[in-house]
Every structure is written in structure tokens, then in C-alpha cells.
Amino acid sequence: MNSRIKNLRGESLMATNTLSPERAILLTKFYKNEMGDKSSIPVKRAKAFKYILENKKICINQNELIVGERGPVAKATPTYPEVSLHSLKDLEILDTRPKVWFKVDDETKKVYENDIIPFWKGNTQRDKMFGLLPDEWKAAYEAGIFTEFQEQRAPGHTVAGKKIFQKGMLDLKKEIKDSIEKFKTSNGPEAQGKIEELKAMDIAADAIITFAHRHTMALISLAEVEENEGRKAELIKMARVCRKVPANAPETFHEMLQHYWFIHLGVITEVNPWDSFNPGRLDQHLYPFYKQEIENGTLTKESAIELLQAFWVKFNNHPSPPKMGVTALESNTYTDFSLINLGGLKEDGTDAVNELTYILLDVIEEMRILQPSSMVQLSKKNPDKFIQRAIQITKTGFGQPSIFNTDAIIKELVNQGKDIIDARNGGASGCVETGAFGTESYILTGYFNLNKILEITLYNGTDPRTGKEIGLKTGNPRNFQTIDELLEAYKKQLNYFAYIKLKGNNIIEKLYAEKLPVPFLSLIIEDCISNGIDYNAGGARYNTSYVQGVGLGSVTDNLASIKYNVFDKKKVSLDELLNALNANFEGFEQLRHDLVYETPKYGNDDDYADQHSVFVFNTFYDAVNGKPTYRGGKYRINMLPTTSHVYFGSVMKATPDGRKEFEPLSEGISPFQGADKKGPTAVLKSAAKIDHIKTGGTLLNQKFSPSFFKDEESIEKLSYLVRSYFRMEGHHIQFNVVNAKTLRDAQKHPEKYTDLIVRVAGYSDYFNDLGEGLQNEIIRRTEHEEI
Amino acid sequence: MEATIFDIKHFAVHDGPGIRQTVFFKGCPLKCWWCHNPESQSKNIESFTRINRLDGKEFKKESPIGYSITIDDLFKTIQGDKIFFEESGGGVTFSGGEPLMQADFLYEITKLCKENGIHTCIDTSGFAPEETLQKIAKIADCFLYDLKIVDNYLHYNYTNTPVFDIISNLNWLDQNNKNVILRFPLIPGITDSRQNLSEVKLFIKSLKNIHQIDILPYHDIANSKYNRFNKENLMKGSGLIPEEQISHIKSEFESLGFKVGIGG
């Protein structure tokens, strides 16, 4: 990388994470001033958005090429008090907590105490939510049966499709005008509401144009005083770019990146949607511009790479908004899950890998930063060179790019009823979530603790940690004569908790649809404009809400252990087993040994164990899949944990697989740490026994020591391993390549490893930023695979 | 029909082309000083004390080394990995011990694999009656064939077997144009002597159809196995072969027109 990029990258890495009150102040001021304004909710939200973009500080970093910051400076992260309000205590915790901290200055604390807290307290989405949710929901939530995504961040989880790379805001304003005309003419019962939505979208489009214009002005001012002629010319060019986009459709490589970046900032300033936002199939969107400009001679490969690297830095300047409470436990990271997709298939079903795909892979390898995250979509139609190049980068150990099965993703989308073209334009975002890019609102609603439900079943509806009765009375398991009776009871409990979760989801979705529309995001995702409906209210072409199952490996081992030790081999009675679990195995060491070492486990291609993964998966699927959502879509499942397997373990006592109390559960669909003894082919075969096509994504983490990557032949063999898994319709696989010695040293001397990035679960993170429990777990995983 | 085996390794990446499953037969007529699988030497199912650790405590248990497996069960296990074989151009490798010691079983399982389109590889010392070797050579796709020491006296000294049959079997495979990859264990103080190296080179130069050799440098990973299975370790205290020496030998083999791999 050249010295400019080196500096920009270095500044981004070194920038201090701060909490910026700027947005909260502007938002509060707006709502205070406009108390008398009787506009509809969407119009008012759009006006507030416009007010923020008209008044926030414009930041142009030295020597940068792509401009625009969400906060007043890089890594100054705003808050969203209309969604969830930080208390003074929360601010104190954020300021001082040892990991994933955000510095909060005294002035911020003061403005929170005097203005922001008094205005928003009791009026946030979070307050309203907890006011409406039923007691049984709260009981299950507090017990750690499930989490709730929309409690601190708004729905989002979506990705830009090709439309926004082909259209400017002025084009969208025209579409809005046509749509308003259409509804005026029809004058149906919902016309007025729709027209209000569309007016709001129109204001939001103006807002982002104004924001870009303010950058133009700032760039011109800078150019006027710039002494370096080269930089002066650059500033003038950048001003010209910002004058053109996003008002008009981009026509050059540079314009395209800047265009996207303004839209990105719009989405993450309007509200704090989960998974930030994401340009999606970047190599596909950019390639026509790249090719044309290279042919015309208006762009060189070097300048394209420089622009891409400058673009990369912008992502890294934007950490995930600060979380608190349970949400901080389930997902505490600076990563905001922008997942760049490369490769895959074109709309016509042919191989999409192009020259720019490889250039982007080079950029990923060279930049080696936390954000954006990256993945490759691998179809059986893609060349070996592509997957092998991706694995070569993985070898360097920072966990990117992860590898996804395009053919499976397309089948998953089509299985959900999507058009084949929309499916081929899709991919995966966040951790592993399948989506039709640009046309779908797909929202994660919360992690679902498959193991805690088994624990509740074993205690006949009671949570052994708190003694509270939160589940159904499905019978004392000591009286069960067969494993089938236990499975039947488990199924009833799971259905019960899934019902509670979905009931809660519908309340929350309604709240977001009515109270927190997102007119700006609605501009971006088709067909909100033509439907005249907000993204949060079901305006997108497709609407999906996910519940994410967690701990498949552990729950499989737990059920297999009970079947094997209690019912089949009769080594121990269920009563004695429960006593051992209650005692956290103290005094039951030999039993624990047998549970750990002499009991069939998931991950070894052993149907005795694996039949239970299929049972739990199907039970979960039947309980959730296809149920209607408030937004007019369907509920679906996927299998991913982020870091919730650690939180979910922390609310559980010891388990029949030999796991001690409060220890983490298995993550994704990976085997429990250390349970797989027959190598990667057996893991892949176990993992492929569930029907991935019925999900919206599964996550498989496979650890390898660096020796598996030692030469081209080894990398080739790994690529065949991936191809085999994908032929079995596996959705995703990621490699973690690092040895335990390095990790242990990093734990002791964090100062020496500030840049050490490891694969966690569906994303990579700085090792230093992980909690100690998670660090230990990753070390254990790594050690296991080195043996 | 049953065989005695001591392990099945999945995702074996050093035992032939592609991703392989390696089946380790138990029992070997040789007793090489540097043997990496000391538990494979006896054809009997011996026992050892397995130690599992949990929370700093040791749990000891008498456990068997190896087990009997029926042809059906073994074939089922092999076929379980077929998808990996197909994607990678891999297959099954029969290793040991010495797989040819259980020749009838080996022939039947190889035949079954062949009938089902699974690539087979025999990893052998070559120490077997010629009719045994020739029979399996008709159906096996590939041989990984050990060439250790050419001098008969030294061969006997370090492996407890004469070298004549090994050499004549190898010559037969070469003359009949069978697919063979030679494997040369590079053992400090034993096979790396100037005399042995020049004899090995002289011999491989005489081969007509075989053009591939993997150098397997000695490593001490097996030391822990000798302790665990309570076997006498004749190589105790041996150092490793320096990198330069390995690459020097590699280039010497290459100059004879061989494709040379390291580490196999």
C-alpha cells in the first residue's frame, strides 16, 4: 500500500473510540422545537433525519479520498436515544469497561443528564417495548431462553442491491412522485398513509443530497487554502464527485464508491440498524465501471486499488454503536458486520468471478483490518483458482474471507419463494444470513437457547438456576421410560417458548412499523417506494424475520448422552445424573469422565449422536418456519450464535455432556469444543445432516493449525474439502488459523498483540477485545485441533 | 471376513493423491528401528493403559490396541467419505503395519472398492510373497512403496528382514508398468549414509517406469507413542535431519529425472 493509505489505515487503527453526543443533541433539539408540528410520524422522522444531516459537523480527514463520517471525527460513535437510552451509569460503564469501551467526556455526561435523559426517558422504543411485552415473555427472556435484537438497535440486517448503484436520489424522487400520483388517483383506504410515507422518503432523499452538498462546500474551502497542487486538484475532483452523487447516478469508479458511502452513512445515521449496512456484491456492482474506465484510460489499476483501500478505511472508522446489558453480553464488539460479498453467480446463472474479484481479494489481504468483513461466494461454477486464492488469504490467520455456498444460498432463497433472479442477486450478510440483496427486509429477532429448553424440560418446567417456574409441566423425567418420552417433552417445551418468542416479536414489529419508520432505508430497498410502505412496516418485496438457534452441537451431545448412559447402557439413572449436574459434578468425577470421553458426540459422523441434531433442528424448524409476521412476511430459522453461546452457557447449570456450569455452549453448528475426534471430514458430514436449504444460514467454524496451509497442494486439498461440504449443501464454513501458544501469549501480553484478529463465530474480532471466557474458549478450541 | 486394524484416519492428505482415508492394518513382518507406528508391529490386539486427563486428574483405563473389523463395516466407513474422494480425486489407502500380511482381506476390500469406483492405494514395505503382491497389483490403482536400504546386510540389521523380495517385487511392478510412488525414509545415521544414498540412487536409476519418490525425513513425533504403548525406542535421542541435507538429496533425486516430494 502507498504512504497515503498507510497513514489513513494507521490513523484509523489508532483513533480513540469515543461516544459522540452530537446526534442525540440534534435529535432532541429537533423534537423539542417541533413539539407543535402535527406532521405524521414518518414525515417527522424524515425531518429529524434532515435536521441532523443539515447541522452535524462535516469531517474531512487529511489526505482521504472518500469522505463522510457519521460522527464529528473518526470512531466518534453517536447514540440513538429514540431507540434505547443510555443512563448515566451506562455511560460510566462504557467509559471505564476494560473491553470494547467508548470514552465519554464530562460534557457528554452533563448534556445527557440535563437534556437527553429527561427528554427521552420513558419514550424510547425500548421503554415502550418492555411496557407491552407479556410477563411470560419477560420471564423467558430473563432466564436466558432467548434474546431480543430490537431492544437496543433497530431492525436493519439488509444489504444494498444493484438498484442503488444505477440510480441517483433524483431518480428516486421521480419514482416517489409517480407513486404519490398513483395513490392519489386510486384514493384507496390506505392512500393517505402511503402518501405520508412517500413524502417522508422524499424528504430523506433531499436530506442526503444536502449532506453531500455540505461536503462539496467543505472540500472547496479546503481546496482554496491548500498549498500542495496535487492535493488541491484532488480536493477539487472530490468536490465535483460530491456534487454529482448521490443526487445523480454514479458514472465512474470513484463516484460509485463515494455514492455508496453517502448512502451507507444515511442508513446508519437515520437509526442504528443491526449489521450496519453493506454494499453487498461489490465486485459485481463495480466491475462495469472498472472495465469501462480501464478501457477509456481514465482509471489505472493502481488508482482503483488506492480508492478501494481508502474506502476500506471508512468502514473501519465506524464501530458498532455502544451496547449495554444483555445485548453487550451476546454481541460485544466494535465490528458492525458489513460483509463484502465476492464471486458467486451472475443474474443469468453464469460464473461471476472477474478481474476485480481478485483485485478485491488483494485489497482484503493487504488491508488486514477488522472492518469491513469479507466473504467469498463459491458456486460449483466458480474456478478453483478463486477458492484457492481465498484460502491463501485465510492462511494469514485473521479469519477473512469466510466461504459461502452460493448454490445453497440460491436454493434457500428460492425455497422461501423468491424469484430466481432476486435469489442470484443475493448473498449473505452479517454473520451468515441469507438475503435477497436490495429487495428483502430480513430481520434477526433473537437467539434461541436450544439447551436451556432441555434444562427446563429436565426440571419439569422450572429453571434450576432461579427456581422459577417458567415452562410447561411436561412431567418428571425420572419417570420417563424411554428417550422418546423425553424428546416429546422437549418438543412441547420448545414449541411453548417459540410461541412466546414469536408473540413478542409481533408486538415489537408492530411498534417499529408504527413508531419508528425509516424513510431513508425505504428509498434503498425495493419495492418500498412503489408499495408506499416503510421498510419497517413490510414495504420491501420480501419480508423475513429470523429466530436463530444456538448450541446445536451441545444439545445433540446432551440428548445423545441421556439416551446412551441412561436408557441404552443404563450406566446411570436419570436421578443420579441430575444429582451430578446439580452438584456441578463435584463428587461425580468418574461419571463426568465417562460423559466426556466415553459417550457418543456430535461431529464424528456417528448417527447415534447426530440423529438428535436432526431431531432438534426439525423440531425448531417446525415451531418457527412459515408462521406469519406482523409485517406480512414469514418467520424462518437460521443457526448462528455471534457470541451468544457464551451468554447462553452462563445461565445454565452443568449439562449431561459433561460441561460444567456456566461454561460456554457449542457455537453455530460446530461440534462442542473438543468433541470431534475424527477430523474435518467427519465434522462436515455431521454438520451436513441437517437440511441447510430450509434455513437462512448456518455457521460452521473449522479450526486448522497453520500446517494445513503449508503449500499449494495443502491449500488445494482444503479447497476440495470445502467443495465436498458444499456438494452436501453446507451453507458456510470458516477457517481459524492460529496456534494456541500465540493466543496464550497474547492473553498474557495483550500489548504485543494489538493487531491480532481471530475468527470468533461468523465474524472476526481483535483478540484483546474478547472477554476472558471467550478468549479461553478459543484457546481450548485451538489446542484441541493442534493435537 | 475380518481384518485386524489399529486406526482409520480421515482427511489423510499425505498418503496418495487427493483427500484420502487411510486404513492402518495391524501386524508387520519388519521391525524398523525408526518405526512411526510401533503399535502396528504385532498382529495381536495388545492392551495398554490409556490416560485421560480432566481438570488436572488422571483417569486410567486398560484399553485394546486395535480391533477386528468386518469387510462390510470397513467398506461402509470407506464409502462414507466417497464425496471427498470424488471432489478431490482421492480414495482409500491401505497402510499399516503391512497390509499385505492380511492379503486375502486386502484383496477382497480392494476389489470391492474398485467395483464401486473408489481409488485404492497400497502403502507397503514390499515384503511379501511375489504371488501375493502380483495378485493385488492387478486391481490396486497405486502403490506407495518403501525403499529404505539396498544393502541386504544393513537392511536386515535395521528392519529384521532381508531386502531381496522387496527389490524383486519392486522390479516386477516397474516392469509391468504399475503406478508406484517410492517412499524413502531419511533416517539419521541409518539411511542417510553416503553408501546407502549412492546405492539407492543407483537402484532407482535402473527403474524404467517409476519416476516419483517422496523423501520422508525422520521426526520424533513417534517418541510419545513409544512411551504410551510401552515399547522400546531404538531411536531415542536421535536428532532431526537438517533442512539443507534434505534439499540436497531432493535435488540429487531430481537430477535422475524423478519427481520428488518431501514429507509424503
Image (tube, coloured by chain):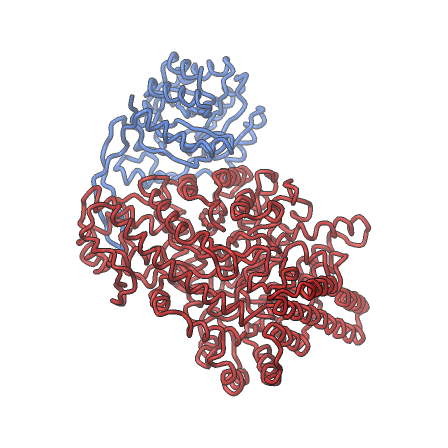
Chain colours: A red, B blue
Say above or below: A111 vs B144: below
Residue A400: give x, y in percent of width and height. Answer: 54, 52
Residue B122: give x, y in percent of width and height. Answer: 42, 24
The reply, left or right, for residue A497 in relation to residue A723 is left
Q: Quadrant of residue A504?
A: bottom left
At horizontal 66% and vertical 58% (from top left) the residue drawn is A309
The reply, left or right, for residue A118 in relation to residue A347 is left
At horizontal 25% and vertical 56% (from top left) the residue drawn is A474
Say above or below: A111 vs A186: below
Q: Is residue A246 visible?
A: no
* Number of numbered discs overlaid on the protein picture: 0
The reply, left or right, for residue B28 in relation to residue A708 is left
Q: Is residue B102 visible?
A: yes
| Along the viewing direction, whichever of A170 and A401 lies nearer the viewer | A170
Residue A648: give x, y in percent of width and height. Answer: 36, 61
Residue projecting furthest to the bottom: A114
Query: Can you say which quadrant of the picture contains the N terminus of chain A?
Result: bottom right
| Along the viewing direction, whichever of A4 and A666 lies nearer the viewer | A666
Query: Can you say which quadrant of the picture contains the C terminus of chain A?
Result: top left
